[in-house]
Each structure stands twice: as structure tokens, then as C-alpha cells.
Amino acid sequence: MSLTLADVDVGIEVEVVSYDGEGLYEFKFISLGILPGDHVVIQSKSLFGGPMAIKHGEWNFFALRKDYAKKIIVKKLGE
Amino acid sequence: MENVLLVGFPNSGKSTIFNMLTGQLRKVSNYSGVTVDSASSELISNSINEKKISVVDLPGVTNLIPTSLDEGVTTTTLIKDCAHYKMIAMIIDLDRFEASLSLLLAVKEILNKKIVVIINKNDHLLFTKAHAQRLEARLGLPVLSISAINDDEKDLDNFIRKHQNDVLAGETLSPKIKIHPDAKQFMPELLPDNHFDEISATEVINSIKSHQAEARQIINSIYKHSTKKTKLTENIDSIILHKFWGSIIFVGIFYFIFHAIYAWAGPLMDFSEGMVSALGQFLAPHMADGFFKSLLIDGVIAGVGGVVVFVPQIMILFFLLSLLEQSGYISRAAVLTDKVMSMFGLNGKAFLPYMSGFACAIPAIMAARSIPNHKERACTIMTIPMITCSARLPVYVLLIGTFVPKITYLGFLNSQALAFFFLYFLGSFFSLMVAKIFRLTIFKGETSNFMIDLPHYEKPSLRFAFRQALRKGKLFLKKAGTIILGLSILIWFLSTFPGPDKKLTVNKTPEQISSMTLEGSVLGQTGKLIEPVLRPMGMNWKMGVGLMVAFGARELFVSTMGTVYALGNVDEESTTLRERLRSEIDPATGLPVFTTAVVWSLLIFFVFALQCTSTLAIVRREMGSWKYPFYMFSYMGVLGYGGAVLVHQFLK
């Protein structure tokens, strides 16, 4: 199993590798500017598996539902 | 007429800009023959300018390759109707600067048309003139930065008019777009070879990626974010979005708003109520008794005054919400509530409108504008009025205070407080359950909350917040007020005519006369006529009149019961009305009229039935069709009647 963004702990910086599932998600994430090679850090996770807050690049912040975070395949830096 | 298309990301403020430019005269039309709504309307400034321009609001898209029919409309219009529009206004969302700039690059690549760039959400003036100039130089396109929620339309209107006159060499007349085969189904009107060429999905993705990369490079070259602000946002979020502390702060903030609406609005409401009755008292001695005096004072001033008293609540709510929104907290609240709301098929952005519904459904319905997905917004709006609003309170106070015996359970639970809590719970529970049912049936669809932007925290401006509050207050007065005015006049007519026989009114007190007037009036007669319908709920014609009048506004139930029982002016604390209600005996059976079954039947009816004309008016305005208020009125009526019958039969 590959590591997805949903599995990463708060505060760990990771790199986006690819997108899981149907081509639809790849489309959506790329259209929203989350590209392979980008660095992301999980800022916080909500109660009961709610959305997770993410820092993207140097100064972007957004939140993603956990189901969508599962679609982003990542790797730890330096791996 | 020259057409300007508005193109941009979902939730980038396109519709706000459209409404600014056109004065909210939104006419929904089926542009390009596709049955998805896109709106087209003339500029307000057409009346004072020779050149007539209209703008078209297209569905929001994140790129030009559609993944749904809605998104397909935008691309279809851009390609197929290329000869029919003069200019494209690209709305760039500053909160999603990079990705929305990348959409602009994609449009620019396939179309050599006049394009102007509008940078929206510059609410804190972080995007300066110098930034705009550098972006203009990089793109070769005119750039204007605005804040649609704070600015007025003048700059924007001038900008569009000015560039409408630009001359463009080699304008594209028959553009072509490169799409992958899966996207074809969403643009049934486009023809192969004429309108598009097919390429592989990988090539499409690569092209989007290259636009993103270019956008990123452009932004890095013109715009620097302060690392101090980023650090601050990170620090605040580590508390605000914390699993435990975040929830506590959230409850605290919203409790405070709830409290403010009740506590602060109280004196202001008393003040405006006082002003209204003072106006009546001031005018009364100057007018001759009779038809016009009664119409003006009992009809118009009393009726419209009933609406004016809600203005303080609306202004306080929107003042506080504007502060929260400017600071950036609202999107965090959406994150914190998303999980719970998603269980009911809604997203976190629906939390705020529901919460506001406890004060009043009208600002709550207006607050639902922040929900981008049409179906989710419709579903939220359609169920908000079941949340127990403050207008139900006088009715609950009267009925529970009079008829629910005071008993203390387990030493601290008060039976009357429990009854209140039960009614609040019932309204909220059903409103979410009905939302769920709607989401599974007529407003079917997945919850749309794909990504929530978390803008950097900023210090809110009190001046902007005050202006927002003022704007919302004015809007409310203007629109709902006109309809309320009409209905107040109508209710006055219906409860006054044909009037009692003059011979019978001799030696009667004014209270007795007004009671006779009501009984003989159209409204009173109708009450008697519908008694068979009221029977299953255990109600008589007098309660029926109360209910009918309460369809204007719920609080009117209390004052109408007063009139029916001939006590003159009463309010919910009036002991004499309470005593009178308790001692009312049914002449047929010799037993009290207000039994436990009747009281609960009335209460249940008030929990569910949509008795508020202002709500109907605002739903019509927000949704743009009478269909929605009609359905809302019907389903809530069925629940109210059904619930009341059930409760009465069960408790009888």
C-alpha cells in the first residue's frame, strides 16, 4: 500500500507523488493547483475524521475531506 | 447590445460581481440552449450611457475541460458562441490566485478575444496598484483589483466600459479546443473538427499542468507573501483547528453571537417598537376617526412596524458575521462542522445559516449565499424555517406558561423548560432530517465541499462590518417590507369588514366591539367555515383565526387571541389573557376548551407550519422563483397539520 496524505501525521512535511483512483481526481487536484512534486504539511485533523487542514507550498492553506486526502499519494521527504 | 462573459472559479464572487453590475435584476435564461441556468442582464449604467452592454454569468469552472454538464456550459459558450460576445471578464480569486490564474492562461491560449482581468477578494487591499501593473505587463491584459463585498460598482463599470472600446487585431472567430474523449458527453452541442480536436487524457493533464506551472512562475515574480503572516496563521490555526480546543472556542464564539442577538437586540427592538407605537399615537389625534385612520394605524403602521422590529437582529447578526468573515474564521468554522453536516448531506458551510435560523429565518436564508452548490443551498434554504426562530417564542411563552404545569423532576429539571427544549429540539431535528430526505430525493447529489480555502488571518475592519450590516438591513426593509405592507393592509381589511351591525354595538366597550367586528369579519367567518378542518387538531374557530392571522407573522397569534377574547391590547405576559384562556369552557361539553391535547396540538402546529410571510418573500427573492416558497409552504403545512392531528388524537 502506498502512503496517502490521509495517513500522514500532523506536522510532517511530505511530497505529492500522484493521485489514486479515477482520472477525475487527477483532473480536480491538478486544476486546483496541487501538482506532483509540491510539498504539503498537515496542519490539523478534525474530530471524528472530519476535514484536515493542509499547508501547501510556502503560503497556501486549505482543508480537504479525509476521503479526498486518501486520493493523494505522497512520500516522505528524502525517500 | 454588446455581451461580456464572466468566467471564473466556483465561489470566486462571479455572481456578486454580476449583481453589482446589473443591480440584481437577475434574469435566469438558458444561454446557448443548454438547460443549465446561466444569467444574462444589462448593466445598470446602460441608462446613462449610449453604449448598451450586457453581462452573462457563466457557471464556475476550474478548467476548460468539463467534468459535468454545468461546467460544459461555460466551455460550450466560449467556443460555440464566440461570435456573439465582445469581451471576456476573467474573475481571479485572490484566495486561489495560482489556480484561477492558470484558468485565465488556458482561456487566453485558445481564444484571441478581448480579455480583462478582475482580481476579486482583495478585501484587505493586499494586492496593490504596483502588483496590478506588474501583472498587466506579464499578461498583456488590463487588470483591476476589487473587493466585491466592500466596493461599489463604479470602478468596475468604468473598467469594463473603457476596455469594451479597445481594438483587437486578429480576433478569433472560430476557436477550437483540445479535449479528451470523456469530456465530449458534457458538451453535446460542440461538433468534432469544427469546435474541438481530440487528444489523450494524459496530454490534457499535461497542458493543465503547464498552465499551473506558468501561473506559479508569474505569481512568484510579482507577488511576495509575508512569511510573518504565514507563521501567524499557522500558529492561530494550531489552536483554532485543534481537535479539542478548536471545538470549545467554536462553541464559545457561536454562543456569544446567539447571546448577542437576544440580549443586544432586546433594547433596540423595544426602542423601534416604541418608535412605531409613538408614531401611531402621534398621528392618531390629528386624524378623523374612521376608515383611513384605522387602516393607517391598525393596518399599515402596526403591520410594517412588526417587520421593522426585526431590523436590529438582522444588523447585529450581519455585523458580527462580517467581523468573523473578514478575520478568516468562517472558513475554519466550516471545517469544524463539515463532518456533522455531511451526515445530513450538507457541508460545513450550511452550519452558519442553520445557526442564524434560531434568531430569525430571514437573515439565515440570506446567509446561505455562501454555499456554492445550488442544490445544497436550495436544500439548506428549504429547511431553515423549521429551526425555532425568535418569533415562535411569544407563542411558546403564552401556551407553555399557561398550560404546562410547573413540576420539578429529579430536583433540577423544570417541566416548562423541558417543554421549551423539546420544541427547539423537534424543530432542529426535523429540519436536518428533511434536509437529508431532500438530498436523497429532489436535491440529489454528493456533498460538494471538495476543498475549503483557509485564507490568512487578517484584522477585521469595524467600518466594513458596519457597512455590511447597514446594507443587509436596508435590503431587508426594502424587499420584505413592501410585501409585508401589502399583507398588513390585506389582513386589516379581512379582519375589519363587513363590520358589526351598528344597533348591536350600543353600550358595548371598545374591546367588545372589536371582538364583534372580528367575529363578523371575513376572517372570522372563514374561521368558522374551516372549523371542520380544525376539528381533527382539536381547535375551534377562534384558534383558527389566530392561526390564520399568524400566517402573516407568528407573533400575531398572541395579539389576535387577545382580540378574539376581547381584552384589547395584550402581550404574552398578560395574566388576564392567561386566566381567560384557562377558564374558557366549551358550551357543548361543559369542559375546558384548552386541554393538554389542544395546547400541544397548537404548539406542534407552530413548530412546523410556515407562518411567516417575510420568509416566503425572502425565499422567492433568493431563489428567483415562486416555486420554492410554494413547496416550502406546502411541505411544512402538511407536517404541521399532520403533526397536530396526530398529537391531538394521541393525547385526547
Image: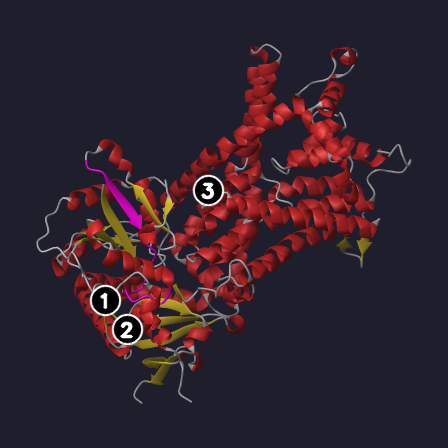
Of all chains, the one bearing label 2 is B
Identify the residue at the far right of this view.
Answer: B590
Residue at 16 percent of width and 43 percent of height: B162
| Residue B592 pos. (x, y %) | 86, 38
> For the residues marked 2 and 1, what is the alpha-carbon distance in whole angstroms?
10 Å
- Quadrant of the image for the N terminus of chain B? top left
Where residue B180 is drawn, which disc sits there? 2
Three-letter amino acid code of the residue under disc 3: Arg
Labels in figure, total? 3
Residue B77 located left or right of residue B482: left
Dominant secondary structure, magenta: loop
> As rendered, which of A47 and B376 lies closer to the eye?
B376
Secondary structure under tag 1 reads strand
> As rendered, which of B58 and B184 lies closer to the eye?
B184
| Residue B317 pos. (x, y %) | 49, 46
Tag 3 and tag 2 share a subunit: yes
Where residue B621 is drawn, which disc sits there? 3
Residue B2 located left or right of residue B622: left
Secondary structure under tag 3 reads helix
Residue B113 vertical placement versus B299 (above, below) = below
Would residue B407 be seen by someone viewing this image from the given angle? no
